[in-house]
Image (spheres, helix red, strand yellow):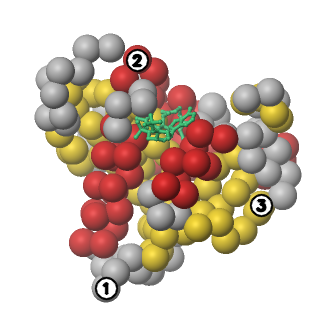
Amino acid sequence: MKITDNSFIFKQLDKKDELPYELLLLADPSKKMIDQYIRKSDVFTALYQEETIGVVALFPLTKNTAEIKNVAVKTEFQRHGIGTFLIENAIQAAQSNGMKSVVIGTANSSIGQLFLYQKLGFEMTEVKKDFFLENYAETIFENGLQAKHMVVMERALKC
Ligand code: ACO
């Protein structure tokens, strides 16, 4: 890891730009699932010294609510505030688009992510039981736990 300052750039991809699948697959192991939402999402990247080191995808769930469908940071750049930077900037983009809330879903086994999203003001609102068992062919284990359910979290935006 070679970060010497915090000069990350948050940049929206054009629809014609190549998608950073290597990063997207870190957050969502199913390319089939990614392809269901990615072209309908606003996709932003974090650049550091011209290198793409993170991605976040913002999907219009309803007229008033955007969903962060995917957020990922290159492994060697994790735990340096870039995930926070991506999420905070995605929230600002949703707010600029007139959204009233942002939701994010993660697995019951994603302990660090559950902690991070709560630190960023997201509140748990729903559990989609068996979501990962029903929608993913592969068995997913993290932190010694099987990913079974999706925990949905929401952050209300100031008008
Ligand atoms: N374990 C414990 N705490 C964690 C972890 C972890 N793995 N990751 C983040 N945190 C918490 C910590 O409190 C951390 O602060 P600290 O390092 O000072 O202790 C805090 O969150 C802030 O972390 P950031 O540095 O801002 O986050 P990072 O740049 O590491 O990005 C992310 C977080 C995006 C989850 C990254 O770890 C990643 O890409 N993981 C793999 C992909 C992934 O799981 N994406 C989310 C899936 S859900 C979805 O996409 C909607």
Viewer-nearest of labels 1 and 3? 1
Question: In the figure, 20 relative to 114: above or below?
Answer: above
Task: Look at mark 2 in the image and give the residue it sits on.
Answer: 76
Q: Secondary structure at mark 2?
A: helix
Count of marks overlaid on the render: 3
Q: Residue furthest top?
A: 1
Can you give x and y, in whole percent of width and height, for residue 32 in the image? 62, 38
Can you give x and y, in whole percent of width and height, for residue 104 in the image? 55, 58
Residue 23 quadrant: top left
Q: Which mark is residue 159?
A: 1
Question: In the figure, 144 relative to 108: above or below?
Answer: above
Q: Is residue 42 left or right of residue 17?
A: right
Q: Which mark is residue 128?
A: 3
Residue 14 visible here: no
Question: Three-letter amino acid code at disc 1?
Answer: Cys
Q: Secondary structure at mark 1?
A: loop
Mark positioned earlier in the residue sequence (1 or 3):
3
Question: Three-letter amino acid code at disc 3?
Answer: Lys
What distance separates the C-alpha of mark 1 from that of mark 3? Answer: 28 Å
In the image, is the residue at mark 3 within 8 Å of ligand 1 by its beta carbon? no
Can you give x and y, in whole percent of width and height, for residue 30 in the image? 64, 34
Viewer-nearest of labels 2 and 3? 2
In the image shown, does 48 or 143 lie closer to the viewer?
143
Tell me the residue at 28%/63% (across/down): 93
Question: Three-letter amino acid code at disc 2?
Answer: Glu
Mark positioned earlier in the residue sequence (2 or 1):
2
Q: Are marks 2 and 3 in contact (CB under 8 Å)?
A: no
Q: Secondary structure at mark 3?
A: strand
Tell me the residue at 72%/68% (across/down): 126
